[in-house]
Amino acid sequence: MSQQIKIQLPDGSVREVAPGTTPLDIANSISPRLAAAVVVARVRPLNTSAPNGTADAEAKAEQTEEAMYSGNDPAGERIVDLVAPLHEDVALELLKESDPAALRVVRHSAAHVMATAILELFPETKLGHGPATDNGYFYDVYREVPFSEADLAAIERRMAEVVARDEKFQRVEEPREQGLKDYEKSGEFMKVHFIERFTNPGDTISLYKNGNFTDFCRGPHVPSTGRVKAFKVMSIAGAYWLGKEDNQQLQRIYGTAFFSQKELDAHFKYLEEIKARDHRVLGKQLDLFSIQEVAGAGLIFWHPKGGLIRKTMEDWMRGECIRRGYQMVFTPHLMRRELWKISGHEENYAENMYPPMELDDAEYRIKPMNCPGHILIYKNSPKSYRDLPQRYAELGNVYRYERSGTMHGLLRVRGFTQDDAHIFCTPEQIEDEMEACVDFAESVLKTFGFSEFKIELSTWDPKDPKFIGGAEQWNRANGSLTRVLERKNISYKTIPGEAAFYGPKIDIKLVDVLGRLWQLSTVQFDWNLPERFELEYIGEDGERHRPVMVHRALFGSIERFFGVLIEHYAGAFPFWLAPVQVGLVPISEKHADYAESVKKRLEAAGLRVELDLSNQKMNAKIRDFGLQKVPFILVVGDKESATDSVSVRVRGKGDQGSQTIDAFVAHAKQLVTEHSMEL
Ligand SMILES: [Zn+2]
Ligand SMILES: [Zn+2]
């Protein structure tokens, strides 16, 4: 009798079963309901330990061609078909639809279903590879004639038939040489390439069959085509075989798949939402900013309405800096090359800087960062421990080189404004200063309407030589940052090896209304620049000491933060930020005078008002203000002018009836002082 193998389940229990038992057998032995719900299995030889970050690693591995085709199973953890016979002691996890790895398997299986449909309709097509991606799947195919929109629709309809046929995905193994011979004969040049490249002579290769369709693939797949329940063929793009222009032009057909129609619908709604909120589109529609070819890529022009929002953001930030004990400074945009040599930017950051320019006396470079400027202010007069901390803040314009083609609206630019600050303090003060920075960052995010954020603590990798300073320095700094986060009772993720080369940092990522993460605020510890610039202060002991330094930016880049705000609010800014807060509409020409007087009173109260005295009809004016997402539209006619009132329409709520001007002003002013998110 052959020896039993051990199967360990996630609850720790161990079953002894005959070799060749499949994960599906085990699921069935637990319950038929479980067997129907599982999609694939994750197995790990029992003598190995679980790796970290499994899902991410799996996602990455799956998208490489090698992972899709190489004949040899890795020794470690892997995802397998439910019907894969088990022959060794393993830890087994049965993955249901809720597991992200299962979603990738259904998407890759959908790629097989699509290839099946393509070959049934267009048998002359040759197949490349068809992996799952973060949002769906694609298949690269070669066919001389380009596929039309109608072809894609036909492919999608045929896919539904393949799914309805509920064909089993069957794994077949055969000698590599057999596979090569068959594929060469049928002219499948891409499959031949993949076998040659990713397997070795003498290997066994695996093929997956469903119905009459066979594909060279390592798997795994869902049990049958019927499990591909919700899918869509999305789009098509061109690509050269192996990325070489002399090669065949391939067609990459994109699709997506989910476990249910409901999830698929939600996905499309999400994509539409993202499109509708695109800050580049809204920026144009609401006349907030532009990027002009004649001036250059990645350089932002703030139009009056965008400029007003920026002014409001900056006013708030400056006021808050002063309230929190910062001093506002201003530093030049151009500084001598010598300075950038001392700071180390010439050495470490040159590829992001614009080339030096020759002036009468020396070479100059445009600043990519504000730090050296603030350091020169610190250094300009002797400091004692009583002067510390010194907190210098500047809304500083910086210019960094980004490769052409990588720019993206306000999010990735070549010229931007940092709400930058540098804090010079004694080593004893560092924890309090870091904590105050994290507090400040939280206040920025909350004020601008983000209630959710994630915090990352980036630390060094002792093995990486780019990190300067010794273990003692790093451990001390990491220790203080950790204590700061723990003191504030904030949960965070530690990311080893992601620190700046000069010290650890805390990054704060906000979560927007669509659940997307944006990296904006950063607070960084630095012992390098004080060293390079030989900064000093006289301590209580009368001796010279070296201060430490904190770099922090909370909006990060004002341009980028603005881009995120536009998308977060879909252009409907909260009242206190809205460039036009009140749109005034007289019912007819004869109410123009009263409308003018209302405008004056609102403006005297500090509100931003636009009065429409054009020849358009009243309803057209209301519609226009609505399209501009103006928070309040006030309509005035006979009744209003007789009662010193306005008829109020609220964005998103419609007509709210009339109100006296005094009551309206009081309410509006309250919204502004409270930075209310109510409207
Ligand atoms: Zn496959
Ligand atoms: Zn800095």
Image (tube, rainbow, N blue to C red):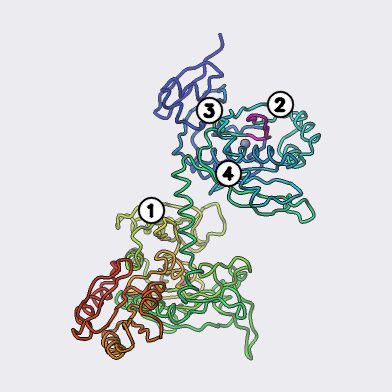
Q: Earlier in the sequence, mark 3 or mark 2?
A: 3
Label 4's element? loop
| Kind of residue at badge 2 | Glu
* Cα separation between marks 2 and 4: 25 Å
Which residue does the image show at 36% across and 74% down from the upper left?
A: 630
Q: Residues within 10 Å of mark 4 (few under 14, many from 20)?
A: many
* Cα separation between marks 3 and 4: 19 Å
Image vertical order of residue 378 relative to residue 406, above or below: below
* Cα separation between marks 1 and 3: 37 Å
- Label 3: which residue? 82
Label of residue 174 in the image: 2
Q: Per the image, is 217 magenta? A: yes
Label of residue 132 in the image: 4
For residue 351, side relative to residue 311 (left or right)? right
| Kind of residue at badge 4 | Ala
Label 3's element? loop
* Cα separation between marks 1 and 4: 30 Å
Image-quarter location of ligand 1:
top right
| Kind of residue at badge 1 | Tyr
Q: Earlier in the sequence, mark 1 or mark 4?
A: 4
| Marks 2,4: beta carbons within 8 A | no
Which segment did they paint magenta?
209-218
Question: Mark 1 against mark 2, which lies toward the viewer?
Answer: 2
For the N terminus, the image quarter is top right
Give residue 351's quadrant in the image: bottom right
Give residue 601's quadrant in the image: bottom left
| Kind of residue at badge 3 | Leu
- Label 1: which residue? 492
Q: Is mark 1 within 8 Å of ligand 2?
A: no
